[in-house]
Amino acid sequence: MELLKVDTIESAREKLIHAMQEKKPEKIRVESNKSLGYVLAEDLLAQEPVPSFRRSMVDGYAVKSADTTGASENLPVLLEIVEEVSMGVPSHGSVKNGTCAYVPTGGMIPEGADAVVMEEYCEMFDKHHLAVYDPVAYGKNVVSVGEDIRRGELVIKKGTRIRPQEIGVMASLGILDAMVYEPWTITILSTGDELVPPFVQPLPGEVRDINSYALKAQAEVCGLKVQNVMVYKDDREVIKEAVVQSLNRSDLVILSGGSSKGKKDATSQIIDEVTDGNTLVRGLALKPGKPSIFGYDRSRAALAAGLPGHPVAAMLVFELLIVWLYKHMTHQKEGPSLFARMTANLAGAPGRATCQLVRLLKKEQEYYAEPVYGKSGLITTFTKADGYLMIGQNQEGVKKDQQVEVFFLS
Ligand SMILES: Nc1nc2c(c(=O)[nH]1)N[C@H]1C(S)=C(S)[C@@H](COP(=O)(O)OP(=O)(O)OC[C@H]3O[C@@H](n4cnc5c(N)ncnc54)[C@H](O)[C@@H]3O)O[C@H]1N2
Ligand code: MOO
């Protein structure tokens, strides 16, 4: 990996976007009920207001609020009850001065009424009259038409990852299906003679495979469709064949391990060969994650990526490039971030951007970012962290007490 040829994160992103133009995720229609986790490919507009009628928030009596002015325990206001509204059906009557109507929670407020007195503040005076002991303000306990969603409102934006609450909004509007992006398919291939599955007790020299599991989960969290996860020994020909087969099936093929200088590290060559020389990125000016390789296979229209074997490096590169690319191509907004003060000085890596994991601490209403130190092979640095900050390639570092932007991990 010659340092001179490496790309910055920005230039790598540009190259990936450019290469994947012809692989823009397709738009498909799915039932709203089955749309959880998909990314919306259209703006959803409300064809009707929600609620569509004026509704009561409480069980009580719909009144003209002005009628209740001055009502008290000692001097209740007497109102004639003119209607008992039932759930799920329209109110027939209207409330005029001196009258009221019983309305259950969620029931329709009769015409003329502008507030609802909770029934706890009322008492039956006789069969047809109500004593009201407390005044209500105009609009109290009334949900007005369109208070939740206005007719014509852009209610869910294109690029929104559909969560349970979006499914609720679609249900409220009677939106039965929606256009979403068909997720890219991905295959994850972990390589290494030393790897054993998690259920095996490793012998000296062996390690349990982390990357297959962690990268698969990361892919799922961001909405990619994981097609296959496979583990291979460091056998160049076997791995190459597996990459070719995977490129035939998947939009993205991720190889982890074998990307650096070791005798058996063949990822770079394999990506060169399978993409017919179309390697786009041969290393990143990033710490960790320098030995990352990306190539675009034109004939199979698929992206091949070789990520560093060290689990934290692999996961960060996956987050900063693959997840970023997928979000970009599906018009998703960037994840949340917040500004925090550094708890310590932190030096950047010369000539490379540094992605530093940090833990967030809250002291006296202010957030502090505390670096989580540790080598990129130590997976628990990731679990101890809340997010990461970036020190620019040309930045010496960040100083204690300096404000930094912390990006949350997905
Ligand atoms: N002479 C040089 N050596 C190294 C360089 C370099 O530039 N020159 N770069 C270092 C950096 S930075 C990284 S990152 C690693 C990347 O190594 P590889 O991508 O070739 O990965 P491996 O050598 O296969 O493994 C590295 C390390 O990670 C462990 N590993 C690999 N896969 C998994 C997995 N699926 N689950 C858990 N752990 C995994 C592996 O056992 C090794 O310990 O190279 C440096 N060396
Ligand atoms: O840069 Mo490596 O990618 O530290 O672990």
Image (cartoon, rainbow, N blue to C red):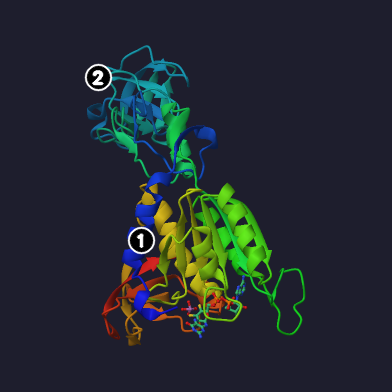
Disc 1 is placed on an element classified as helix
Disc 2 is placed on an element classified as loop
**Horizontal and vertical percent position of residue 175:** 44, 28
Q: Which corner quadrant of the image does residue 78 belong to?
A: top left
- Which circle marks residue 97 in the picture? 2
Label 1–label 2 contact, CB within 8 A = no
| Amino acid tagged 1 | Arg
Q: Dot 1 corresponds to which residue?
A: 13
Q: Is mark 1 within 8 Å of ligand 2?
A: no
Residue under the point 28% across and 34% down? 71
| Residue 9 to residue 374: above or below | above
- Which circle marks residue 388 in the picture? none
| Amino acid tagged 2 | Asn
Q: Is residue 133 visible?
A: no
Q: Is residue 44 left or right of residue 319?
A: left
Front in this rendered view, residue 50 or 345: 345
**Horizontal and vertical percent position of residue 322:** 45, 59
Number of marks present in the image shown: 2
**Horizontal and vertical percent position of residue 68:** 27, 30
Question: Mark 1 or mark 2, which has the lower sequence index?
Answer: 1
Q: Give neighbour class at mark 1: few <14, some 14-19, many 20+ (Cα, 10 Å).
A: some
Ligand 1 falls in quadrant: bottom right
Q: Give neighbour class at mark 2: few <14, some 14-19, many 20+ (Cα, 10 Å).
A: some
Residue under the point 38% across and 80% down? 3
**Horizontal and vertical percent position of residue 407:** 37, 66
| Residue 5 to residue 275: above or below | below
